[in-house]
Amino acid sequence: MQYIGKQKWKWAGHVARLQDNRWTLRVTEWQLRNGKRPRGRQARRWRDDIVRTMGNTWTREAKDREEWRRGAEGFILQRMDGA
């Protein structure tokens, strides 16, 4: 579980640092046009874990690689606690 969390964190940082309008960045930031999700328990999106740890400004904060690397441990611990 730690390995998966670390890889997810590293990938999120990589995607956030992309300079151009690549599909990976566009898909990460994409939202439904009407803003509604299906009824029932909401499925967790890929970025929900990152936003829960770093807030909505995570893409801006990921630009600083060293700071982003320091946040990895907290993210992994939070995932292991099931938060």
Image (cartoon, rainbow, N blue to C red):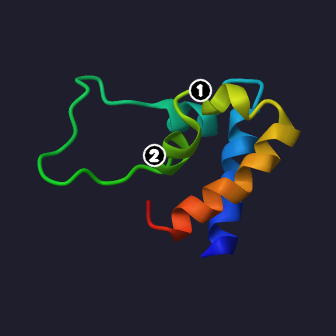
**Dot 1 amino acid type:** Thr
Q: CA distance from mark 2 to mark 1?
A: 12 Å
Under tag 2, what secondary structure? helix
Query: Which residue in the protein does label 2 denote?
Result: 48
Q: Nearer the viewer, residue 27 or 64?
A: 64
Q: Residue furthest bottom?
A: 1
**Dot 2 amino acid type:** Asp
Asked whether, in this view, residue 53 is left or right of residue 13, the answer is left
Asked whether, in this view, residue 76 is left or right of residue 68, the answer is left
In this rendering, the answer to whether 67 lies above or below 71 is above
Asked whether, in this view, residue 79 is left or right of residue 35, the answer is right
Q: Quadrant of the C terminus?
A: bottom left
In this rendering, the answer to whether 77 lies above or below 27 is below
In this rendering, the answer to whether 11 lies above or below 64 is below
Task: Report the residue at 74% width, 24% height from top.
Answer: 20
Query: Which residue in the protein does label 1 denote?
Result: 57
x, y (%) of residue 3? 69, 73
